[in-house]
Image: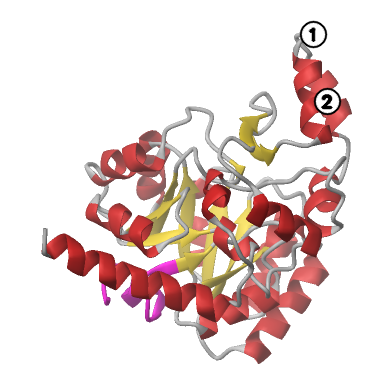
Amino acid sequence: MENRITQLFNIKYPIIQAGMIWNSGWKLASAASNSGILGLIGAGSMYPEVLREHIQKCKKATDKPFGVNVPMLYPNITEIMDIIVEEGVKIVFTSAGNPKTWTKWLQERGITVVHVVSSVKFALKSQEAGVDAIVAEGFEAGGHNGRDETTTLTLIPMVKEQLQIPLIAAGGIASGKAMLACMVLGADAVQVGSRFVASEESSAHQKFKEVVVTAKEGDTQLTLKELAPVRLIKNKFYNELQELYKSSPSVDDLVKLLGRARAKKGMFEGDLEDGELEIGQISGLIHDIKPVATIVEDMVAEFEKAKANVVNL
């Protein structure tokens, strides 16, 4: 399965474990890397020194490549980047910001840079900024998302048509069959989030994991476009949000209802009523909580079987 992405990251399989807030700590990232894919630590939910601790523990738990996902809206972004360099991390995925801001600075320090986008426009801007690869994420994805609601199977070929650098598909991918579909459409690899939330090594609360594996079609919705679009499982907080929308709320009204630490409350602390429960549409096809190694093994086996079946059509 060697290609541009496996060579870029020095990994066995072209799969990236997404660096999700409150889910992607060192245990998940190291387990992913030890399984032959690229593990990512999600810096978005970590104070700088907490991130340093996770990086150090990850280095002790794996001798394979791993990276850090950094939302560039993070208030301590300079300190975060300094820690990444000091700790010798060689791969950084950036998101939620202008890729020009940090790409050159990181690359000058020997770091491979990947930027996450949700449109052709920003894919091209990222390429112009000099990133080494991009993640194109469709509207099916969990967590923060694009406003245009472009689906993964539409976005990937549109981006591929104009992109020269390696392309990673994300959004709605939790199986080997979905991985094959994305690669047929032009992706060099896939980034997987929701499936790894429901893993034994995820730092998500057990109650949240259990909600994910019982979710069905229609149980998630993209909302809060006025702030930062986010896909949520429908719960008490979601229903309160929809009730507020009936009154044509201002941004301030939405911010007030959202409050602070909603995501932590839901995903990390297990408050299924008042917490923010971020997950992708593909949760309707996730039915069990497994070790990361088993998830990767199953995905690769299904990919190879599906690939053989396509050849025989």
Q: Which residue is mark 2?
A: 240
**Is residue 89 shown above or below 131?**
below
Q: Position of residue 112 (x, y in %)?
A: 45, 68
Circle 2: element type: helix
Q: Which residue is at a point 40% across and 60% down the rendered structure image?
A: 190
Q: Which residue is at a point 68% across and 75% down the rendered structure image?
A: 201
Q: Is residue 269 left or right of residue 279?
A: right
Q: Which mark is residue 310?
A: none
Q: Which residue is at a point 71% across and 63% down the rendered structure image?
A: 80
Q: Earlier in the sequence, mark 1 or mark 2?
A: 2
Span of residues in magenta: 1-15
Task: Examine the rendering and report whether any part of residue 87 can be seen.
Answer: yes
In the depicted view, which residue is nearer to us: 98 or 34?
34
Q: Which residue is mark 1?
A: 247
Q: Is residue 82 left or right of residue 281?
A: right
**Is residue 184 shown above or below 199?**
above
Q: Is residue 135 left or right of residue 196?
A: left
Quadrant occupied by the N terminus = bottom left
**Is residue 204 shown above or below 110?**
above
Q: Position of residue 69 (x, y in %)?
A: 60, 61
Residue density around tag 2, few if under 14, some if 14–19, many if 20 or more, within 10 Å: few
In the depicted view, which residue is nearer to us: 181 or 261?
181
Q: Position of residue 59 (x, y in %)?
A: 64, 86
Task: Examine the rendering and report whether any part of residue 132 can be seen.
Answer: no
Mark 1 touching mark 2, by CB under 8 A?
A: no
